[in-house]
Image: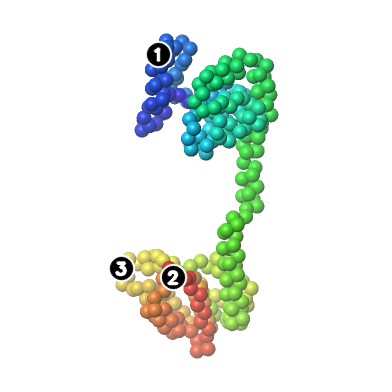
């Protein structure tokens, strides 16, 4: 609260300058109208508790419709009747909960009458304050965050993403079935993937023996020694060349870009590490 934001990068507001100039012209400056410097957060309670009414007045524009004026939360905390302009969710709350008055945009005469009425009518202020006390607990942290906590504990996918997940699960179930039907009984399997933990769901139901997992991604080459002259295929070959031949090799979503030459080289490298009657299974991401 105050006429000048503490951030030096923010300029002084034009409306504030005009208001100060007008108050001086009407000889109200420092007598009936006061402009304080920026109030420290810990000191703002004192100003609020000495006040009779809290104002939140705005022009008709898109910001008014979609913003949520947190200063009104301070007014509710302090038990101050709220006077605000129409057109946003705060105005609707003020009307529905009967915690103050709502005025039309730029109707200065109505605003003046309402300020005078609320400031001088003790019985009206008492009604507003009782209603403020009723709704205040709804804004306590433990209550305001309850829906978020509930969602975090029992989260669920958005409708569109849920469909995508269903399609992914369907595809994974097909892959899982293929692996189970063909790799069951294999004792030594190489799995090349981008995420070994994600792929555990695909093969966890199949009776596959020891699995040697090799994770690769778009930065596969850059993760190696910077002085290495090996290309991606060369690095892959160096990773598996010292191992015994495999009963089966599973390549699942391991490379984002597949060219005919890359696929040819990849197949040759993998074939060199595959037993004569071994199985080779590919599942690639669709190229863009």
| Quadrant (top left/top right/bottom left/bottom right) for the C terminus | bottom left
Q: Nearer the viewer, mark 3 or mark 2?
A: 2
Discs 3, 2 touching: Cβ within 8 Å: no
Q: Which residue is mark 1?
A: 24
Q: Nearer the viewer, mark 1 or mark 2?
A: 1
Residue 92 x %, y %:
61, 33
Q: Which of disc 2 and disc 1 is earlier in sequence?
A: 1
Q: Nearer the viewer, residue 13 or 282?
A: 13
Find the distance from the CA under tag 3 to the CA under tag 1.
Answer: 74 Å
The residue at 49%/29% (across/down) is: 58
Find the distance from the CA under tag 1 to the CA under tag 2.
Answer: 70 Å
Can residue 148 be seen in the rendering of this structure?
yes
Q: Which of disc 1 and disc 3 is earlier in sequence?
A: 1
Find the distance from the CA under tag 3 to the CA under tag 2.
Answer: 30 Å
Q: Choose top left, top right, bottom left or bottom right for residue 122.
A: top right
Residue 171 x %, y %:
57, 71
Residue 172 x %, y %:
58, 71
Q: Which of disc 2 and disc 3 is earlier in sequence?
A: 3
Q: Which mark is residue 287?
A: 2
Q: Which residue is mark 3?
A: 227
Dot 3 crowding, Cα within 10 Å, few <14, some 14–19, many 20+: few
Q: Nearer the viewer, mark 3 or mark 1?
A: 1
Q: Nearer the viewer, residue 247 or 116?
A: 116
Determine the secondary structure under disc 3. loop
Q: How many numbered marks are there?
A: 3
The residue at 59%/78% (across/down) is: 178
Determine the secondary structure under disc 2. loop
The residue at 61%/37% (across/down) is: 141
């Amino acid at each position: 609260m105050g006429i000048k934001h503490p951030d030096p990068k923010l300029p002084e507001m034009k409306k504030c300058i005009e208001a100060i100039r007008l108050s001086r012209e009407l000889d109200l400056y420092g007598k009936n109208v006061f402009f304080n410097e920026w109030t420290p957060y810990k000191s703002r309670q004192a100003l609020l508790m000495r006040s009779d009414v809290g104002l939140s007045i705005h022009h008709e524009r898109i910001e008014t419709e979609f913003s949520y004026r947190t200063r009104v939360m301070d007014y509710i905390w302090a038990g101050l009747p709220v006077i605000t302009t129409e057109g946003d969710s705060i105005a609707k709350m003020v009307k529905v909960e009967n915690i103050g008055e709502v005025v039309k945009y730029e109707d200065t005469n109505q605003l003046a009458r309402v300020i005078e009425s609320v400031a001088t009518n003790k019985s009206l202020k008492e009604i507003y304050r009782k209603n403020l006390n009723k709704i205040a607990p709804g804004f306590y942290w433990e209550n305001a965050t309850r829906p978020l906590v509930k969602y975090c504990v029992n989260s669920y996918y958005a409708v569109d993403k849920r469909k995508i997940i269903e399609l992914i699960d369907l595809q994974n179930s097909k892959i899982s079935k293929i692996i189970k039907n063909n790799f069951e009984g294999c004792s030594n399997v190489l799995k090349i993937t981008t995420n070994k933990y994600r792929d555990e769901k695909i093969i966890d139901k199949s009776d596959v023996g020891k699995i040697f997992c090799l994770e690769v991604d778009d930065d596969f080459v850059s993760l190696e020694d910077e002085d290495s002259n090996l290309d991606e295929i060369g690095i892959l070959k160096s990773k598996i060349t010292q191992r015994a031949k495999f009963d089966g090799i599973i390549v699942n979503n391991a490379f984002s870009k597949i060219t005919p030459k890359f696929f040819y080289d990849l197949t040759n490298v993998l074939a060199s590490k595959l037993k004569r009657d071994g199985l080779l299974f590919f599942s690639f991401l669709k190229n863009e």
